[in-house]
């Protein structure tokens, strides 16, 4: 074990933990004032429930030795997960690796809530969170990082394109469609964009722990991930604003911070596999395709992805996974592979297979989960509850005094 790597990973875990409160602010500013507390509560609920599930059995299902589809039960209750290094890193404590991965699981589950904001009952959120992290997140994490079939196939996902962004985006889309549109969706507008800007800045800051920490050591790959993360976020702003300025004639602050998130999502699977120049291209295109996902795609199909969980994370993660198959190079990371532009088209095929499989599995299992939850708990708020606001009707409190 190396103390330098341990300190580095401890700091990265704290950064990723901070992303969930940042997401609460980001989402909270985007809803109407009567729903800001209920929206932030969704992120806090993920932090509470997923943290416990991860300790009891989630980490074992995701990362313990098992088969191609799911991990075993060797590490239930963190049995055998101590300060000594584990199988995933020889230089940091096994328990630290577990905590780092826990912050990913928490954030992923919280991202979903952006799709069903302003119309879901809190009891449904609690049960859905418990079931989803168990039956969707843990298996997908195992497939990619825990010795499962996607990792064994050779598909690349440095920090969570499939595991975090596609899975949360697709899950959010499914729940949004099942719930239906908000009654006042057409008149809904952000109540505090300063909250959203502050939350977005916190998310961007935490993303350095997210991507750089996925190297598990502060080496050349980690530095590429550090550079690429910031570069793609900046490029994402440019890509989004260029399209927004041309179409809507005004570049907006909300567009800028949304573009940054789009660039961050897009670079996540590729961060430790591509060059900085490639990260510029990935970020710019990420901003453009996420703008399309947020405005054109949603308008065309008429679903109410309230805070654009699918538009940003599903679309951005999909592009990032494809981009990894195009731009990955062993000159950056000799533990990775060469993509199409570096002479190996097979990686792009593997990336597409992994993406399609993640879409299909997450969509089907999420649909089953939300339908099962609806059998025992009424998932949709009533028209009256939605009109009054979920802060008062679900939690009995208000964010602002009259």
Image (cartoon, rainbow, N blue to C red):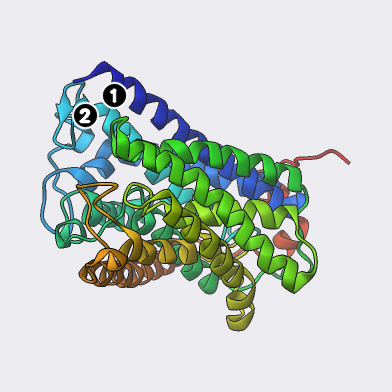
Can you identify the residue that label 1 sits on? Answer: 5
Q: Give the residue at the far top of this rendering.
A: 3
Q: Give the residue at the far bottom of this rendering.
A: 300
Q: Nearer the viewer, residue 54 or 169?
A: 169
What residue do we see at 51% from left, 39% from top?
A: 19
User: Quadrant of the image for the C terminus?
Assistant: top right
For marks 1 and 2, give the CA distance: 12 Å
Q: Is residue 99 left or right of residue 124?
A: left
Label 1 Cα crowd, 10 Å radius (few <14 / some 14-19 / many 20+): many
Mark closer to the chain start, 1 or 2: 1
Label 1: state its secondary structure: helix
Q: Is residue 328 left or right of residue 64?
A: right
Q: Is residue 223 above or below residue 367?
A: above
Q: Is residue 246 above or below residue 388?
A: below
Asked whether residue 242 appears in the rendered view, the answer is yes
Which of discs 1 and 2 lies nearer the camera? The answer is 1
Label 2 Cα crowd, 10 Å radius (few <14 / some 14-19 / many 20+): many
| Residue 85's disc number | none
Q: Position of residue 278 (x, y in %)?
A: 42, 56
Q: Is residue 223 above or below residue 394?
A: above
Q: Position of residue 76 (x, y in %)?
A: 19, 38
Q: Quadrant of residue 247?
A: bottom right
What residue do we see at 63% from left, 62% from top?
A: 240
Can you identify the residue that label 2 sits on? Answer: 94
What residue do we see at 34% from left, 66% from top?
A: 326
Q: Position of residue 71 (x, y in %)?
A: 17, 49
Q: Position of residue 381 (x, y in %)?
A: 63, 62
């Amino acid at each position: 074990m190396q103390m330098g790597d341990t300190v580095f990973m401890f700091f990265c875990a704290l950064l990723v933990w901070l992303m969930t409160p940042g997401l609460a602010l980001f989402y909270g500013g985007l809803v109407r004032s009567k729903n800001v507390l209920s929206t932030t509560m969704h992120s806090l609920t993920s932090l509470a429930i997923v943290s416990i599930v991860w300790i009891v059995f989630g980490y074992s299902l995701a990362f313990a030795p098992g088969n191609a589809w799911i991990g075993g039960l060797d590490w239930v209750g963190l049995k055998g997960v101590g300060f000594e290094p584990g199988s995933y890193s020889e230089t940091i404590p096994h328990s630290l690796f577990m905590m780092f991965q826990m912050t990913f699981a928490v954030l992923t589950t919280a991202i979903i809530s952006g799709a069903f904001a302003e119309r879901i009952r809190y009891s449904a959120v609690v049960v859905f969170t418990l079931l989803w992290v168990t039956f969707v997140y843990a298996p997908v994490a195992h497939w990619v990082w825990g010795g499962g079939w996607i990792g064994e196939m050779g598909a690349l996902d440095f920090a969570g394109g499939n595991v975090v962004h596609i899975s949360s985006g697709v899950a959010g889309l499914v729940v949004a469609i099942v719930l239906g549109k908000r009654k006042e969706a057409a008149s809904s507008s952000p109540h505090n964009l300063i909250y959203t800007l502050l939350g977005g800045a916190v998310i961007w800051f935490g993303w350095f722990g997210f991507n750089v920490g996925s190297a598990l050591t502060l080496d050349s790959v980690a530095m590429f991930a550090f550079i690429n993360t910031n570069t793609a976020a900046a490029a994402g702003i440019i890509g989004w604003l260029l399209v927004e300025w041309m179409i809507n004639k005004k570049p907006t602050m909300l567009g800028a911070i949304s573009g940054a998130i789009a660039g961050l999502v897009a670079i996540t699977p590729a961060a430790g596999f591509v060059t900085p120049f490639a990260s510029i291209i990935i970020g710019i295109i990420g901003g453009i395709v996420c703008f399309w996902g947020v405005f054109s795609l949603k308008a065309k199909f008429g679903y109410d992805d309230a805070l654009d969980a699918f538009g940003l994370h599903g679309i951005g993660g999909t592009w990032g996974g494809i981009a990894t198959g195009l731009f990955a190079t062993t000159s950056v990371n000799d533990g990775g592979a060469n993509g199409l532009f570096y002479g190996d088209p097979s990686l792009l095929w593997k990336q597409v297979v992994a993406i399609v499989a993640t879409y299909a599995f997450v969509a089907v299992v999420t649909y089953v989960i939300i339908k099962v939850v609806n059998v025992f708990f009424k998932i949709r708020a009533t028209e009256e509850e939605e009109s009054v606001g979920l802060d008062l009707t679900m939690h009995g409190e208000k964010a602002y005094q009259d």
